[in-house]
Image (cartoon, rainbow, N blue to C red):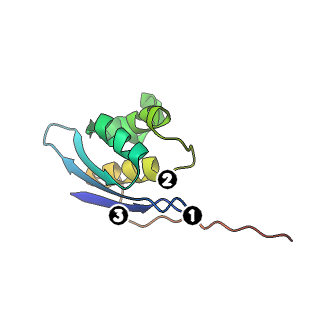
Amino acid sequence: MAKAEICAGVCGFNTTVVARADGNGRIDLQIESDCKSVRKLADELTSVDPWKEFSWRRGNPETLALAPECLAHPACPVPSGIIKAVEIEAGLALPADVSIKLSKSDE
């Protein structure tokens, strides 16, 4: 099992993604979120092929294909967190935290 805990930022919404290999080459997803848009994505995205999520060469990852239909903000970090959890569960990546630090200056 791989888990991603995502704090989306200024919106204040938190999302937890649990990814589990199903034994047939797919990854089952459990996504819980404070955000109604992410919950809509979770309803649509319950199982994915990790190889399609892992590379652009096999077409758009299903997570990114569904995101515009469900999410209001293209900069939402949740889709990336979902894909990272899938990669880790499939053995395609190591579990390491990611970070985006944002700031604004008048200089």
Q: How far across and down, in percent of the image, does residue 81 sit?
A: 41, 54
Closer to us: mark 3 or mark 1?
Answer: 1
Q: How far across and down, in percent of the image, does residue 7 sit?
A: 45, 63
- The first of marks 2 and 3 along the sequence is 2
Front in this rendered view, residue 25 or 82: 82
Kind of element beneath mark 2: loop
Front in this rendered view, residue 73 or 102: 73
**Discs 1, 2 touching: Cβ within 8 Å:** yes
Q: Amino acid at mark 3?
A: Pro
Disc 3 marks which residue? 95
What is the number of callouts on the image? 3
Q: How far across and down, in percent of the image, does residue 105 sit?
A: 79, 70
From the viewer's perspective, tell me whether residue 27 is left or right of residue 86.
left
Disc 2 marks which residue? 77
Image quadrant holding the N terminus, namely bottom left
Q: Amino acid at mark 1?
A: Ile
Kind of element beneath mark 1: loop
Image quadrant holding the C terminus, namely bottom right
**Discs 3, 1 touching: Cβ within 8 Å:** no
In the image, farthest residue toward the top: 59
Closer to us: mark 2 or mark 3?
Answer: 2
Disc 1 marks which residue? 100
